[in-house]
Image: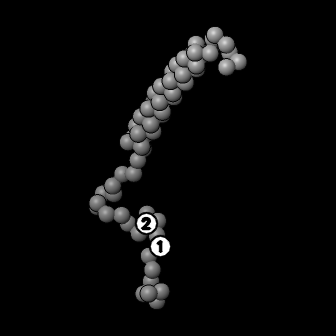
Amino acid sequence: DGAGPYAQELIRAGRESFVDGWQNAMWAGVAVMAALFLYVLVRGPRPTESGDRSAKHSPVPERSRADA
């Protein structure tokens, strides 16, 4: 209680500042996630013409019969 008569006022101001900062951070997070969603929506993977992935685009190399 070193703050004396201003202790309750300081506690209230600290809580309000924390909540205001948290709310601003949440809105900033919403804006970043919306921007990333739009980026993935526009630049994301597209299906091939035949509808299936060809071997040259596959991240895992195909195994030959000798490897099996």
**Residue 46 appears in the figure:** yes
Marks 1 and 2 in Cβ contact (< 8 Å): yes
Q: Is residue 2 above or below residue 55?
A: above
Mark linked to residue 58? 2
Q: Secondary structure at mark 1?
A: loop
**Which quadrant of the structure image shows residue 18?**
top right
Image point (58%, 13%), residue name:
9
Q: Secondary structure at mark 2?
A: loop
Left or right side of 46 for 20: right
The amino acid sitting under disc 1 is Pro
Residue 63 screen position, x and y as percent: 45, 80
**Which quadrant of the structure image shows residue 40?**
top left
Image point (44%, 37%), residue name:
33
The amino acid sitting under disc 2 is Ser
Q: How has the structure been colored for display? A: one colour
Q: Residue furthest top?
A: 5
Q: Is residue 40 above or below residue 26?
A: below
- How crowded is the residue under tag 2: few (<14 C-alpha within 10 Å), some, or many (20+)? few
**Residue 17 appears in the figure:** no
- Would you name the residue on which mark 1 appears? 61
Image point (39%, 51%), residue name:
45
Mark linked to residue 15? none
Q: Residue furthest bottom?
A: 66
Residue 41 screen position, x and y as percent: 38, 42
Residue 19 screen position, x and y as percent: 50, 24
Q: CA distance from mark 1 to mark 2?
A: 7 Å
Nearer the observer, 14 or 54:
14
**Quarter of the picture holding the N terminus:** top right
Image point (38%, 66%), residue name:
54
- How crowded is the residue under tag 1: few (<14 C-alpha within 10 Å), some, or many (20+)? few
